[in-house]
Amino acid sequence: MAVPVRALLVICVAIAGLLWGEGDAVPSCTTVQTQLLPCLGYVTGKADAPSTSCCNGVKELNNEAATRADRQAICKCVQQAASNFPGIKQNLIAGLPQKCGVKTRVPITPNLDCSKIQ
């Protein structure tokens, strides 16, 4: 059974709209926390170095920090996540990008005024 060209066109336009629409939203805190969760062992001092999955999360967050709104949202989510996990060592979380070899657009630190991030 052949699919009418008109129906195929409608489906393609709908999929394109979904894909393009995702780029407009700032990263959610769930996304930020999921990407940084593998870093928990390191930032609490239970691991000597960040894991590969931790560094991949830091890289992904950096890639998602395209706009000022993205960077401010990520900053706020990092602060929220840090407050939810006792025992996080601020010096370790702040040093994550360097340990992972990532030059970040967003400083990863619980004490930063996120509204000042450009």
Image (spheres, rainbow, N blue to C red):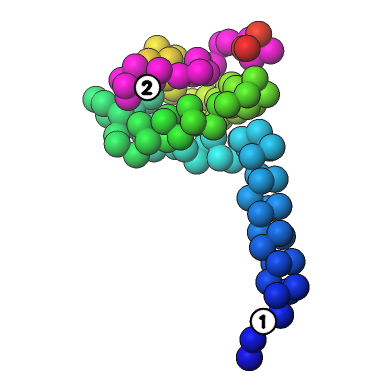
Q: How crowded is mark 1: few (under 14 residues within 10 Å), some or many (20 or more)?
A: few
The picture quadrant where one finds residue 116 is top right
- Judging depth in this view, the residue of 48 and 25 nearest the camera is 25
- Judging depth in this view, the residue of 64 and 50 nearest the camera is 64
Classified by dominant secondary structure, the portion drawn in magenta counts as loop
Residue 17 is situated, as x and y percent measured from the top left of the image, at 71, 52
Residue at screen point 50% across, 41% down: 34
Within the magenta stretch, is there residue 64? no
Residue 110 is situated, as x and y percent measured from the top left of the image, at 54, 16
> Circle 2 — which element?
loop
In the rendering, which numbered label is found on residue 3? 1
Seen in the image, is 76 located left or right of residue 93?
right
Which contiguous range is marked in magenta? Answer: 97-115
The picture quadrant where one finds residue 21 is top right
Residue occupying the far left of the picture? 48
The answer to whether residue 99 is above or below residue 37 is above
Q: Which quadrant of the rendered structure holds the C terminus?
A: top right
In the rendering, which numbered label is found on residue 102? 2
- The type of residue carrying mark 1 is Val
In this view of the protein, can residue 112 be seen by the observer?
yes
Give the CA distance from mark 1 to mark 2. Answer: 47 Å
